[in-house]
C-alpha cells in the first residue's frame, strides 16, 4: 500500500488533470470550476448554472465547494453549497449535499442504499456535477436531507399549496443577487 504522502501526491496529480479536463470540455455548459486557493488542488469552487428547463430551479446560479480527501479517488469528496443555500430535499440546511454517489463505498449500515449506488473510484468530478444538476430536476424524496423541503414538495405534487415553488423561487432570486 502506498504511503499517505504518495497517495496524496497521486490524488493531487489526478485532480489537476480532472480540473483541466472539466475546464476544456465542450459539453459541460452550465458548470464552472476553479480552485478556492491556487495552492490547494483538493478544494474546488463550483458554479452551477441551472438550465431554464428545470421546473423549479431554472435560471439559478448556485455556488459550492467540492472538497476532496487525501485518499481520493478511493474515498468520495464532499460538496457543500455556499450562500444562498438551495432549498432542496437533498441538501441539508447547512448546505451539504446528500447524494448516494458521495457516500463512502461499501454496504449502507442503514440498508437504504445498495453498494453499487455509493461511491466508486470510477466516479469523477464531472460525473458528480452532472448528477447534482440532474438532482435539481428530479429530487430524491425517498431519502431527504431537508425534511421541510421534501414535505412541501410532496404536498405540492399532491395538489397542495405551491409553498415549495414559492420558497425555491426566492432562493433562485437570491442566487442571482436579487432580493425582495
Image (tube, rainbow, N blue to C red):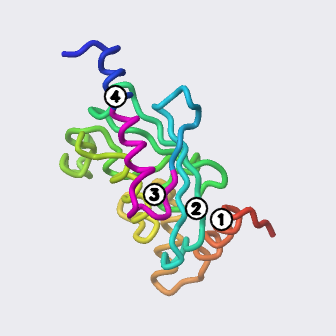
Q: Nearer the viewer, residue 128 or 112?
A: 128
Q: Position of residue 126 (x, y in %)?
A: 36, 52
Q: Position of residue 17 (x, y in %)?
A: 36, 38
**Residue occupied by mark 4:** 11
Packing grade of label 3 (10 A; few <14, some 14-19, many >=20) is: many
Which residue does the numbered mark 1 point to in the structure image?
Answer: 171
Residue identifier under label 2:
87
Q: Between marks 3 and 2, how big is the CA–CA gap?
A: 9 Å
Disc 4: CA contacts within 10 A as few (<14), some (14-19) or many (>=20): many
Tag 2–tag 4 contact (CB < 8 Å) = no
Name the spot of residue 100 as percent of width and height, x first: 32, 51
The CA span between labels 1 and 3 is: 15 Å
Mark nearest the camera among 2 and 4 is 4
| Mark 1 or mark 4, whichever is nearer to me | 4
- Magenta region: which residues? 14-32
**Rendering coords of residue 13 (x, y %):** 35, 29
Local SS, label 1: helix
Residue ID for mark 3:
90
Instruction: Name the residue rendered at 50%, 59% in the picture.
Output: 147
Amino acid at each position: 500500500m502506498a504511503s499517505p504522502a504518495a497517495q496524496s501526491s497521486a490524488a493531487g496529480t489526478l485532480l489537476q488533470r480532472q480540473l483541466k479536463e472539466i475546464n476544456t470540455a465542450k459539453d459541460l455548459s452550465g458548470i464552472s470550476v476553479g480552485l478556492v486557493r491556487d495552492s490547494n488542488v483538493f478544494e474546488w469552487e463550483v458554479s452551477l448554472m441551472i438550465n431554464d428547463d428545470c421546473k423549479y430551479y431554472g435560471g439559478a446560479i448556485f455556488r459550492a465547494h467540492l472538497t476532496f480527501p487525501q485518499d481520493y479517488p478511493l474515498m468520495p469528496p464532499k460538496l457543500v453549497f455556499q450562500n444562498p443555500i438551495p432549498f432542496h430535499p437533498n441538501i441539508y440546511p447547512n448546505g451539504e449535499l446528500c447524494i448516494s454517489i458521495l457516500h463512502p463505498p461499501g454496504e449502507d449500515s442503514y440498508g437504504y442504499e445498495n453498494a453499487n449506488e455509493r461511491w466508486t473510484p470510477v466516479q469523477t468530478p464531472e460525473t458528480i456535477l452532472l448528477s447534482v444538476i440532474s438532482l435539481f430536476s428530479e429530487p430524491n424524496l425517498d431519502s431527504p436531507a431537508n425534511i421541510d423541503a421534501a414535505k412541501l414538495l410532496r404536498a405540492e405534487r399532491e395538489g397542495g399549496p405551491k409553498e415549495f415553488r414559492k420558497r425555491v423561487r426566492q432562493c433562485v432570486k437570491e442566487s442571482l443577487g436579487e432580493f425582495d
